[in-house]
């Protein structure tokens, strides 16, 4: 068996399981958002995102297998349940959906995708010292997450402008071309 100079294998197991659980929560959130935005211009990109999230979760499961990390099902269930509970949160309206809900969901999703990209970047760093990880796949997942984040950032800005007024482009940093 080859020697792997990777350190803190137990901590890596916790880390990967946390990202795997977050992937489950992201899939649930996007599924809910698709239902809300059915028939709108957001439906197709959200469906594509959901498909990519499923594929990314499968990639994380391959990481757990490659590194012999046991999948902690209680984390999966906990995040799934937490996502369901957040549906009951109040956004200024008791019986109907608030426009603030769309903004909060797009913001939360953008933040989650940014964290996911960081997770893939961390695994890519680990791949430098552990040849059981597929560097090319991790590079592809990093690029995919970056593209998702850019789309979600634009969508979030549009939803914010639609909710409160203003121009989505007003939030674009001046050094971004």
Image: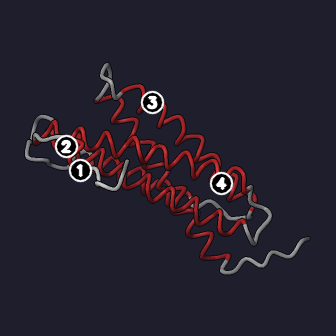
Q: Residues within 10 Å of mark 4 (few under 14, many from 20)?
A: many
Give yes or no for contact between labels 2 and 1 (Cβ–Cβ under 8 Å): yes
Q: Are marks 4 and 3 in contact (CB under 8 Å)?
A: no
Q: Assign a secondary structure to mark 1.
A: helix
Nearest-to-viewer mark from 4 and 1: 1
Secondary element at image label 3: helix
Quarter holding the N terminus?
bottom right
Q: Are marks 4 and 1 in contact (CB under 8 Å)?
A: no
Give left or right: position of 12 versus 99: right
Residue found at x 58% / y 58%: 120
Residue at the spot of label 2? 160
Tell me the quarter of the picture where residue 175 sits. bottom left
Marking on residue 47: 3
Instruction: Give the distance between the C-alpha atoms of the residues marked 4 and 1, in whole angstroms.
Output: 30 Å
Sooner in the amino-acid sequence: mark 4 or mark 1: 4
Give the Cα distance between marks 2 and 1: 10 Å
Q: Earlier in the sequence, mark 2 or mark 1?
A: 2
| Residue 173 x %, y % | 29, 55
| Residue ranking furthest to the top | 39
> Which residue in the structure is indicated by mark 4?
138
Q: Nearer the viewer, mark 3 or mark 1?
A: 1
Name the residue rendered at 57%, 52% in the picture.
142
């Amino acid at each position: 068996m080859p020697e792997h100079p990777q350190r803190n294998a137990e901590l890596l197991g916790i880390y990967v399981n946390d990202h795997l659980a977050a992937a489950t929560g992201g899939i649930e959130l996007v599924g809910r958002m698709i239902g809300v935005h059915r028939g709108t211009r957001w439906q197709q990109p959200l469906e594509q995102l959901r498909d990519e999230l499923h594929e990314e979760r499968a990639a994380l499961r391959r990481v757990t297998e490659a590194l012999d990390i046991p999948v902690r099902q209680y984390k999966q269930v906990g995040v799934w349940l937490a996502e369901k509970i957040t549906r009951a949160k109040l956004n200024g309206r008791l019986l109907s959906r608030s426009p603030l809900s769309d903004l909060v969901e797009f913001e939360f999703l953008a933040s989650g995708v940014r964290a996911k990209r960081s997770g893939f970047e961390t695994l890519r760093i680990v791949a430098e010292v552990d040849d059981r990880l597929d560097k090319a796949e991790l590079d592809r997942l990093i690029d995919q997450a970056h593209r998702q984040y850019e789309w979600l950032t634009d969508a979030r800005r549009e939803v914010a402008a639609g909710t409160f007024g203003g121009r989505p482009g007003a939030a674009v940093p001046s050094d971004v071309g």
